[in-house]
Amino acid sequence: MIGDPVLRLSEVGKGFHGTTVLDGVSLDVPQGQFVALVGPSGAGKSTLLRLVNGMHLPDSGTVRTLGENPAACSRSRLRALRARVGFVFQQFGLVGRLSALENVLMGSLATLRLPRYGVMSYPRALRIRAVEHLDRVGLADRRFQRCDTLSGGQQQRVAVARTLLQSPELILADEPVASLDPAASMVVLEILKRISAEDGISVVCSLHQVELALATADRVVALRGGRLVLDEPAAGLAAERLREVYETARAGSAQAGAGDAQRDGRVGARDG
Amino acid sequence: MLSAMAGWGPAMVSTTPATRAPATADPGPLRPPWSARALIAAGLLVAAVAVTWLTFWWIGLSPASLAAGLDDTARLLRRMWPPDLPRAGDVAWMIVETLLIAVAGTGLAALASVPLAFVAARTHKGPRRLRPPARAVIVLTRAVPTLAFAILFVRIFGLGPLAGALAVAVHSVGMIAKLLTDAVEEADPVPAEAARACGAGEVQVAVSSVLPRVFPALAGIVLYRLDINIRASAVLGVVGAGGIGVALQTALGSLNYHRAAGIICVIVVLVLLLELLSVTVRRTVLRPTVRRRTASRTSRRDLVGRDTGAAGRTAGDTTGTAALPGGRAPHDVGWDRGRVLRVAGAIATGVVFLVSLWSLDPDPGRLSGAWPNLRAVLTGMWPPAFSGDLLMAVLESLLMALGAAAVGAACGLVLALLTAVNTTPWRPLSAMVRVLLVVVRGIPDLVYALLFVAALGLGPYAGFLALWISSTALAAKFFADSLEQLDPLPHEALTSVGARRWQAFAAGIWPQFVPSFTGNGLFVADLALRESVVLGIAGAGGVGYLMQESIATLRYDTTAAIVIAIAVVVYAIETLARIARRHLL
């Protein structure tokens, strides 16, 4: 695996209900790189991320994640693959009624056999590790607080800690800061950046804020209307060029309905 | 991993508390502190298990008796086959009478509920002392089941649909008025303030400012109650209060099981058609709720503000264009399609209601004849005569209900997990269970009770089985509905973590589901309790039998005691459920 990219998409296409969402996208991500994925709503960012961990399967082209092809995996292989890939959601995906610690502990479920309910149903060693990860995101003192009483930024940090408990080799973040205020956004991105740099974990993070993308990422990839339109190192990239991606999208509103189709598709795909 | 983390400690910036222990040191507490929530949940679970065990002991339920019971039931079903349907004309008339009872009862209840709800609402600004009695009427009429009122009214008004319709009406008042009270209390107080500021009296404020705003809620509540009442009317005949139940009671009484099976089939088909109709209506009418509600509100506000000259706006106009359409006089209310349809609908509803009243045959001679009976009943009720037997019977009803609800909730949970789209292991299975549940729910509890009494003999055993079946079906529906409303994101997140199906359920869905599981479970217990009270009428144990007997033997003081005991128990359970729900959410 050494030298191989952590993630390789080749000519990937994906559509929902007849609407093309991704169209011939190719992308290689080497180990340890922080990739910012930018582009207007409906450009296919979420779909791309979901193709990587097999929550969606491509219509055409191939996806290789950590050397595996999600489309060819059996259910248990896919589960094992997902355990190695962290996923951070825009809306956190936390169970609001449970404590921060229990939500973090859920990140270890793939290594456990039986269903778990309650902090005490997890092994002590895992609880210690979970607290350490909560500490790493600065929330160790909030471990027994209900997640729905935490602020948005704190909730996202709990979600990041949950991902860390997976010991991921790749982290996918689907607009992790889109529902956060600027200060909280900075904190969450800084944590992701730090994890990437210090643990050598690749991060693919979709973002809307051009400035944040340029400040955090090693490399910026832009999607528009399901196509890859820009792929350059962040250093030296002019913010103007990234804004153009959004500007042209506004001019031609062909993607207006694509965002909805994508969302519908996600629901359908989960049911299936 | 650990070494990487150790390097993290001091490097962490703004997110880290100033004093941080290194990763190898004491991680702090790993055991969550005890919470009241966990204690209540554990308490409820222990209580449910204990009550179930006590119920099994009381009714003598064992694997052997259960097997024997199934055997007897199968034998009865064989004797009922093939069903013998009455003549089509008879069937049609029985169905129409059943529907008319429900319409008349619901209509009367709606008319009575409006003033009651306004007086009972916290926002009521009129005479203060009217409020407690209004609240008491709402609680009492809700606590005493329709069939209990039916027995009483058959005694007062004689056999027939009049007693049935009044029973339906009185019991419905409780629910309609309670829900309407909530709607009134939630309505924005500012328009009422404005009307008061214009010098309007309290009745005027209620009629012209509050009523239009709660009208959509009222219509929804009344339609929902009508649905329930049609089901209830189907079995009122068992105590002689008219409708299709009379034929069922006659058939069972004369041991004509083929005919009884035929009538049960008719009831089931009627209820299923109703279910289908209400689902269709809900799909077509309620989906664009927001727009329609705004539309009707706009138009009614226009009616109220007619003299200000704002009446020209068309009813379907939700865009807020205030301009008058060309060629319309300022006083023209605007007879467009929407208004014509609404007025026609209102007139049709009124006509149907009047026809239903007329069909009850309320001639003055009969009503005045009822007067002495009513006086005898009311004077005979004082003082209420409590006795040990009575309390034991109430306890038996309570045990039957709680035991059946506990077992039913457990079975219902399994069925719900099979049905809900986000938990079902296999889609076609979900559809099959769904259809089965609709059919099982379609048959009234009393019919189950009558069948089990015919198969297994008198006693609480038959009542428990009947309640168990209905509680299971009801719980399964409630649970499946609320499972489908849960936030899907945690489940998705856990899937992306690599969790197994059961792990993702236990960690991502179950914790979210606990409050609605508890709430709906308690609600099922509440409903089962009300039902258990009346099952005794069929001889299926509990206090219902005593109640029927006390009325038949003119011991109204006992009747009063039973009614009071039922009301107290139902109210107590309801209060407990409310407290538990509040602390668990």
Image: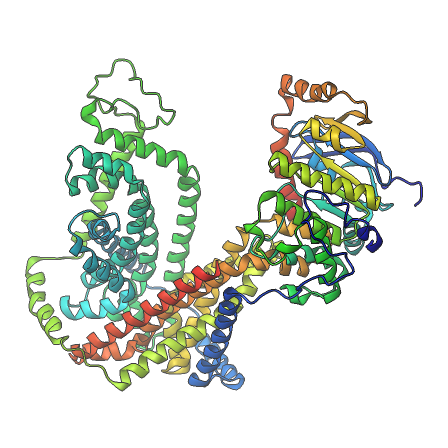
* Outermost residue to the front: B19
At 31% from the left and 45% from the top, the residue drawn is: B219
Q: Work out whether B306 lies above or below B147.
A: above
Q: Which one is nearer the viewer's eye here, B389 or B370?
A: B389
Residue A53 point in image, percent of width and height: 76, 45
Q: Position of residue B39 (x, y in %)?
A: 51, 69
* Residue in front for this viewpoint, B363 or A67: A67
Tell me the residue at 21%/42% (across/down). Answer: B206
| Quarter of image, res A38 | top right
| Residue found at the far top of this picture | B327
Q: How many marks?
A: 0
Please name whichever residue, B441 or B159, is drawn nearer the observer in this view of the structure.
Answer: B441
Residue A121 shows in the view: yes
Left or right: B445 in relation to B174 = right
Q: Quadrant of residue B396?
A: bottom left
Indicate the position of residue B473 as horizontal and vertical percent values: 47, 64
Answer whether residue A22 is visible to the viewer in this image: no
Up-down relation of residue B133 to residue B407 (above or below): above
Residue ID at (29%, 33%): B341
* Picture quadrant of residue B502: bottom right
Residue B394 screen position, x and y as percent: 32, 78
